[in-house]
Image: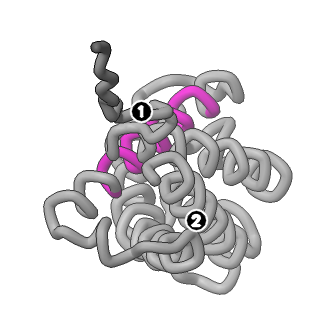
Amino acid sequence: MASETTTQTATDTGTALESWQAGLVGGIVGGLAFGVLMTMQMEMIIVEAIPGMYGVGASGMIGWTIHMAHSAVLGVVFAAILDLGGLGDQLDTNLTMGLADLGYGLVLWVVLASFVMPAWVGAMTEIAPPVPDWNAASAIVPDWNAASAMGHAVYGVLLGIVYAVLSA
């Protein structure tokens, strides 16, 4: 007499990425969008200021490369913050993750774009932006603050949405 047995097998689609990988991809996607906005609205920043931070002469290609490296690293940093703080499980929808990263993008704008970058640019180049760079019309680019804040917000929201989708 023959007997049948059934074995249940777990299947995994393998589509979810590790947290750091989702942060990396989200950072790249957000960085691309922010880079386009920056190129259209603040071209001098991507062509002169960003390469100048590293002692390199004016170059859009180098500025874009450095900007994208910063974007990817900051995406991984956000993933690490979520993991270390246990926040990843609490931000359980694409919308809440997008809103959390909107906040992250704005914190990056306040800390990095308003304080660190102008100090660094001032130390490495002949450009002398104010620190913090919150003037209504910056010495570098008119309306720099609004455009920079918007670019960082776009970066943050896209990072959060991509992160949520890829890490689910």
Relative to 153, is 5 on the left or the right? left
Q: What residue is disc 1 on?
A: 11
Residue at position x 31%, y 14% in the image: 2
Is residue 98 visible in the rendered image? The answer is yes
Mark 2 and mark 1 in contact (Cβ < 8 Å)? no
Q: Is 132 left or right of 48, judged from the image as shown? A: left
Task: Name the spot of residue 54 as percent of width and height, x first.
Answer: 40, 31
Looking at the image, tell me whether mark 1 or mark 2 is earlier in sequence order. 1
Front residue of 148 and 29 = 29
Q: Is residue 143 left or right of residue 17?
A: right
Q: In front: mark 1 or mark 2?
A: 1
Horizontal side of 83 relative to 16 (left or right) equals left
Q: Nearer the viewer, residue 10 or 131?
A: 10
Q: Which quadrant of the view contains residue 28?
A: top right
Q: From what the image shows, is residue 62 above or below residue 145? A: above
Q: Quadrant of the N terminus?
A: top left
Marks 1/2: CA distance? 39 Å
| Residue pictured at 14% horizontal, 60% vertical | 84
136 or 13: nearer the eye?
A: 13
Region rendered in magenta: 64-78
Q: Which residue is mark 2?
A: 152
Name the residue at 66% across, 85% down. 136
Q: Main secondary structure of the magenta part?
A: helix
Q: Amino acid at mark 1?
A: Thr
